[in-house]
Image (tube, rainbow, N blue to C red):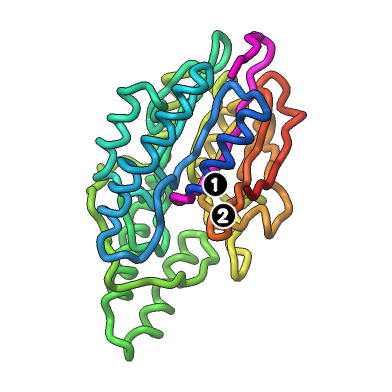
Amino acid sequence: MTQIINEERYVIIYTVDLHGSEKMYKALFKISLRENVNSIVIGGDILPKSYADDLIGVQKKFIRNKLIPMFKKFKKENPSVTVYLMMGNDDFKINMPFLEEGEQEGYFKLLDMKVHKLNNKFNICGYGHVPPLPFLMKDWQKHDTKKTMDLSDKCDKKFRELIMCKDEQRKKLEKEYLLLLSELGYNHHIHHYNVKGILSVEKNDETTIEDDIKSLAKETSPEKTVFVIHAPPWNTELDIVYPDGAHIGSKAVREFIEREQPMLTLHGHAHESYEISGQFMEVIGKTVSVNPGSEYDRDKLNAVIFDVYNLKCMKHIKFED
């Protein structure tokens, strides 16, 4: 691929929540070449999602046998295109060393809690953790803010009771769990859960999402930085989910955007937000925030293409190869 170098043009294609769909990865590469992008950015949940008994092994195998070879081939054929990616809340942290091997080989750059230079003017950084929610895997879950730590602990403990309880206790515990969620400010529903699932592999430290993003922001100039944050800002068009239109985003992320006003934030996590709201973008003050949505279960790629020098011309695409 021959690419025209122009400092006043830097085009990014952004997608998220591919969940190991090979068709979507191939579609992503195809569109990237067609649009002559400078960078590909993938905002988390990059590995297969299933209820397999050995999901850790499934994800490890995907990284080694599918993901690394795909990006190796793409980088060899398109050396001028830089790929940035990170894990999300459905990707097991224990497999991170295998992604780090790919980064060391130069196939892509990992984003979580790192700042990279896009070009001489702009930076990009990432953050993969999400607030506590009713999902079995807890590797990428953290308290949202210090104010909610105690309540989040109670909520998480109640969820663990719920997934292990006897049938006759279920309705009572579900009611108690939903009440705790509502106290946290989430009008949420109970997701399908599987008692054979793994609750946690990696224990997170005691910092909050609020702490981490503040720390990350100190390493760069927010007004000249693209922040890739898996959790969308709370109470926006970008964090709505089925079946009841609940908002599942991060209050810490919302507060960070309102306070620091970064140039652009890229999100995911709430797959159906675009389908429900019809909006892939929301402007908060001077900040443009984006969630393209995900249809990984249909192998249909949702992505956003934009030039960092002209965010007004951002476009949303759906692609089915």
Q: Residues within 10 Å of mark 2 (few under 14, many from 20)?
A: many
Q: Which residue is mark 1?
A: 24
Q: Quadrant of residue 102?
A: top left
Report the number of numbered marks. 2
Q: Which residue type carries mark 2?
A: Asp
What percent of the width, then of the height, locates residue 97?
25, 35
Observer-nearest of 147 and 291 = 291
Q: Residue at x 43, y 72 (%)?
A: 192
Q: Residue at x 58, y 52 (%)?
A: 294
Q: Residue at x 62, y 24 (%)?
A: 37
Where does residue 198 sit, x and y in percent of width and height? 26, 62
Q: Quadrant of the N terminus?
A: top right
- Furthest residue to the bottom? 168
**250 relative to 62 in the view: left or right:** right
The answer to whether residue 168 is visible is: yes
Left or right of residue 72: residue 299: right
**Dot 1 amino acid type:** Met
- Local secondary structure at mark 2: loop
Give the residue drawn at x 55%, y 8%.
120
Residue 228 drawn in magenta: no
Q: Which residues are magenta?
A: 1-21
Q: Which residue is mark 2?
A: 299
